[in-house]
């Protein structure tokens, strides 16, 4: 049992509309923990516990690449999962979180980032052994989210005083800061895109989404010409996510980014996304670009300085690797 309440507040809505027309029927549900589960092997015991005894639900859940968020608020897992979802390797909007060491008694949290296909965020506490069954039934539309909310377990003791009726367990208070520029992160060489945001900003997963300065957008590693596809897709990605900086973004063109750095890219185009998708792709493919190679610690300060007009892009000091 946690010695102090874990912050379970989340935003009321999530940027998950892009997944609504995609098929994720075979995607595993990510499993996370906010507490130390103890001895070696206990984390996999959690995965087995949420799959339950019914063999039909075995292999439906999988520990996330980074699943251990001991001592972190639930918001940290939320931010991480949004980045993980971009890779399309796990279900993008449904996942499981253990928030108590005695999860077999206290249950686990189901997180839904797209309730009723309305991008609404809610949580539901359920018996651990029923978690996978519940998410599978929601995924195939055999049962509704509300069916499980009606029978939700009461909050566990360690979350007393941190509950809310609107979000299941808690509601994220809005950030009062001015939105920062959001620089898109891309990969053309197989870099770890769930780790990259935190490498650029060590506090990334603790920040409110409004205060994050970068987001993983896409990996084009498997493309015959990754760079060409990236150039064509950036304006189109800006149409899908208007918060992205239209002209500047980051490309991880090397796999070992901690040693080799990343490319800062400036694309010359008017930034007008009120166009047909095919036209946006054509504009990106034909745009002039300039690049600068930077070590990770210098990336966000450099891009922010250019975006605010303090320096010119060409004056960014390139690193040698």
Image (cartoon, rainbow, N blue to C red):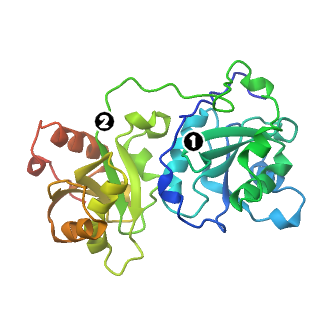
Q: Residue at x 54, y 58 (%)?
A: 20
Q: What number is the disc on residue 180?
A: 2
Q: Specify whether residue 259 is in view.
A: no
- Residue contact between numbered discs 1 and 2, judged by CB atoms under 8 Å: no
Residue 176 at x, y percent in the picture: 39, 23
Q: Quadrant of residue 238?
A: bottom left
Left or right? Give the position of 2 relative to 24. Answer: right
Observer-nearest residue: 31 or 71? Answer: 31
What is the quadrant of the C terminus in the image? bottom left
Observer-nearest residue: 196 or 306? Answer: 306
Q: Quadrant of residue 59?
A: bottom right
Residue 75 at x, y percent in the picture: 56, 36
Furthest-right residue in this view: 53
Which element carries disc 2, helix, strand or loop?
Answer: loop
Q: For the residues carrying marks 1 and 2, which lies nearer the camera in this image?
A: 1
Would you name the residue on which mark 1 appears?
Answer: 120
Furthest-top residue in this view: 161
Which element carries disc 1, helix, strand or loop?
Answer: strand
Q: Specify whether residue 200 is in view.
A: yes
Q: Quadrant of residue 234?
A: bottom left
Please determine whether, in this image, residue 35 is positioned above or below residue 200.
above
Residue 177 at x, y percent in the picture: 35, 25
Observer-nearest residue: 14 or 29? Answer: 14
């Amino acid at each position: 049992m946690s010695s102090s309440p874990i912050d379970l507040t989340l935003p009321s809505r999530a940027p998950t509309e892009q997944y609504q027309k995609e098929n994720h029927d075979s995607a595993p549900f990510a499993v996370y923990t906010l507490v130390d589960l103890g001895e070696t092997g206990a984390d996999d015991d959690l995965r087995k516990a949420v799959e339950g005894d019914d063999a039909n639900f075995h292999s439906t859940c999988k520990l996330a690449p980074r699943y251990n968020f001991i001592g972190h608020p639930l918001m940290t897992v939320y931010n991480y999962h949004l980045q993980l979802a971009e890779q399309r390797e796990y279900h993008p909007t449904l996942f499981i979180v253990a928030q108590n060491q005695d999860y077999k008694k206290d249950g686990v949290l189901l997180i839904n980032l797209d309730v009723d296909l309305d991008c609404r965020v809610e949580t539901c506490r359920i018996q651990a052994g029923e978690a996978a069954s519940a998410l599978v039934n929601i995924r195939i539309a055999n049962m509704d989210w509300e069916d499980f909310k009606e029978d939700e377990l009461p909050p566990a003791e360690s979350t007393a005083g941190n509950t809310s009726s609107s979000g299941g367990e808690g509601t994220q208070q809005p950030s009062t800061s001015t939105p920062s520029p959001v620089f898109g992160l891309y990969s053309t060489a197989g870099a770890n895109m769930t780790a990259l945001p935190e490498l650029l900003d060590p506090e990334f997963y603790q920040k409110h989404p409004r205060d994050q300065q970068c987001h993983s957008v896409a990996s084009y590693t498997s493309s015959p010409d990754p760079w060409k596809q990236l150039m064509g897709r950036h304006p189109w990605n800006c149409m899908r996510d208007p918060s992205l900086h239209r002209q500047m973004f980051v490309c991880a063109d090397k796999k070992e980014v901690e040693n080799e750095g990343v490319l800062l890219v400036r694309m010359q185009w008017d930034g007008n996304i009120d166009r047909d998708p095919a036209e946006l792709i054509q504009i990106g493919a034909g745009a002039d670009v300039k690049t600068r190679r930077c070590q990770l610690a210098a990336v966000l300060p450099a891009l922010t300085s250019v975006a605010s007009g303090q320096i010119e892009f060409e004056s960014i000091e390139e690193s040698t690797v």
